[in-house]
Image: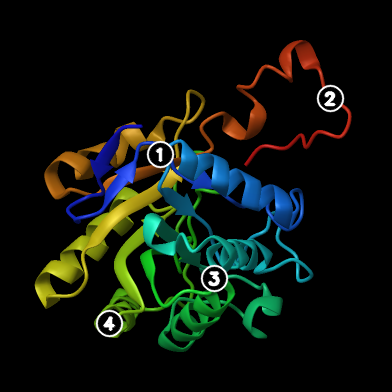
Amino acid sequence: MEYRKLGNTDLDVSLICLGTMTWGQQNTEAEGHEQMDYALDRGINFFDTAEMYSIPPMAETQGSTEKIIGTWFKKSGNREKVILASKVAGRGRMDWIRGDETKLDRENIEKAVEESLKRLQTDYIDVYQLHWPDRPINIFGGGLGYKHIESETIEISETLNVLNDLVKQGKIRYVGLSNETPWGVSEFLKFSDLNNLPRIVSVQNAYNLLNRTYEQGLSEFYFRSSVGLLAYSPIAQGYLSGKYLDGARPEGGSYYFV
């Protein structure tokens, strides 16, 4: 396995990161444990999860993926061998997560971290990411072109200041973004540099042969600002696996595109 520094951090992460979002719904706890054993045995030391998982999101299974990782940590004693990334939900009406609209304010982020740490059975998260922006964006199937929508948003200053406090408390080590635009990455970098707050070390966005938007606006940040890419959906939600060729729709498959 090859390893690289994540952004400008001291973290040596494997080129392959283990995704976990199906554990607790499409995969059992035993299967999740088996996958983590398999990955670690082959040199994969980077695991990614989120408070919202498992997928598709629903009240009955929210947090189940983190719980499975937590029971594996407890059983295996392998926490120190893993670079662990998780995410806090952005703005949305998933009231089953914290009983109200999720948003990236101090109250939500502090509660999210505490709950994730309990489920994960660990004292710290290596890379804590904002799962999606607090503002409306067109990244989730919104098509091409940006349409501005005036809405209430949490100031980046509040978000970064609470993340800074969590870093000082030792609950998280580094901060990342996810499903973010070039404008958003630029604003976070600018504000952190001007105010000596935690710098964004990575952005987790979709990247595959059918979705190469990362190359147009975000790849430059890697070279100029040391913001690493965590590429998700490498086979475009199964579309590049070959199972949908010639209009085929396998029985029991999930046929949708975001």
47 versus 65 height, above or below = above
Query: Residue 255, relative to residue 74: is it above or below?
Result: above
Numbered disc 1: secondary structure = loop
The residue drawn where x is 20% and y is 56% is: 9
- Asked whether the residues under the numbered discs 4 and 1 touch, taking CB atoms below 8 Å apart as contact, a structural biologist would say no
Nearer the observer, disc 4 or disc 3?
A: 3
Query: Which numbered marker is on residue 43?
Result: 1
* Res. 250 mark: 2
* x, y percent for residue 104: 45, 76
116 or 151: nearer the viewer:
116
Tell which circle, 2 or 4, labels the residue nearer the N-terminal end. Answer: 4
In the image, 207 versus 139, the foreground residue is: 207
Residue 143 in view (yes/no): no
Residue 18 in the image, given as x and y percentages of width and height? 50, 45
- Where residue 158 sits, quadrant-wise, is bottom left
Name the spot of residue 38 as percent of width and height, x first: 56, 40
